[in-house]
Image (cartoon, grey):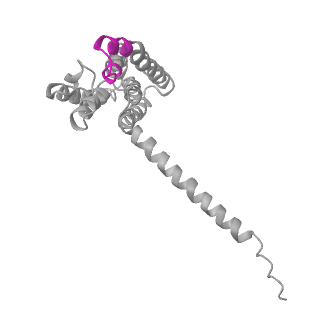
Amino acid sequence: MTWIAAALTGFALSACAGLRVFLPLFAAGLAARLAEWPLAAGAEWLASDAALVSFGVATAVEIAADKVPALDHLLDGAQTFLAPAAGALLAASSFGDLPPWAALALGVATGAPIAGGVHLLAATTRLQSSLFTAGAGNPVLSLAEDVLAAVGAVVAFVWPVLVVATGIGAAFWIRRRRRRRAARARAASPAPAPGRGG
């Protein structure tokens, strides 16, 4: 994986942190532990037993608490500060080829605003839902955010494989179409006239 691909993975995880703070942190640690996803120097603790247990429990609590009326708005308030911090950490952890200070600086400059922007959009949508549905639509929005964060975290790690697979599939499809066109062209061309005998 090139550093560009790793950085894009970090940015995608930062966006997920704008929806669920702890889920992408748990996913990053799990990927580093099970799939040897490279972490930047100083971020190896994300794959430790303590971090995985803590982030796993925090993810479950966050998902459950977000379904409770009124508590979901308190959670949004806390995430205003937690989401950018998580986004910065996730982005910084992806810059494995850079010195720690440079990785942290880039993480703060890129991951924090990505996570903060996504969270602001989600929180604004939640407020509008509370106004128009008296909070009845909030659990549905929360479930949609759960799905987006989970799918986004998975795609963040597998998208290079998906890109390669898509490219190979497209190449085979184009080759097959060209062969079919060539076969049609041969079938449509008139047969050569037979030569006259002497």
Number of numbered discs overlaid on the protein picture: 0
Point out the residue furthest to the front here.
Answer: 198
Point out the residue furthest to the bottom here.
Answer: 198
Quarter of the C terminus within the rendering: bottom right
Which quadrant of the figure has residue 186? Answer: bottom right
Quarter of the N terminus within the rendering: top left
In the rendered image, residue 82, in percent from the top left (x then y), is placed at: 32, 16
Which quadrant of the figure has residue 189? Answer: bottom right
The correct choice, above or below, for 115 with respect to 38 in the image is above
- Asked if residue 38 lies left or right of residue 184, the reply is left
**Nearer the observer, 17 or 7:** 7
Q: Is residue 193 visible?
A: yes
Identity of the residue drawn at 56% across and 56% down: 175
- Asked if residue 48 lies left or right of residue 118, the reply is left
Q: Identify the magenta region.
A: 91-108
Q: Is residue 80 visible?
A: no
Does the magenta run of residues contain 77? Answer: no
In the rendered image, residue 190, in percent from the top left (x then y), is placed at: 78, 73
In the rendered image, residue 163, in percent from the top left (x then y), is placed at: 45, 41
**Nearer the observer, 169 or 53:** 169
**Nearer the observer, 122 or 65:** 122
Which quadrant of the figure has residue 91? Answer: top left
Q: Main secondary structure of the magenta part?
A: helix
The correct choice, above or below, for 126 with respect to 161 in the image is above
**Nearer the observer, 191 or 89:** 191
The correct choice, above or below, for 84 with respect to 13 in the image is above
Does the magenta run of residues contain 92? Answer: yes
In the rendered image, residue 178, in percent from the top left (x then y), is placed at: 62, 58
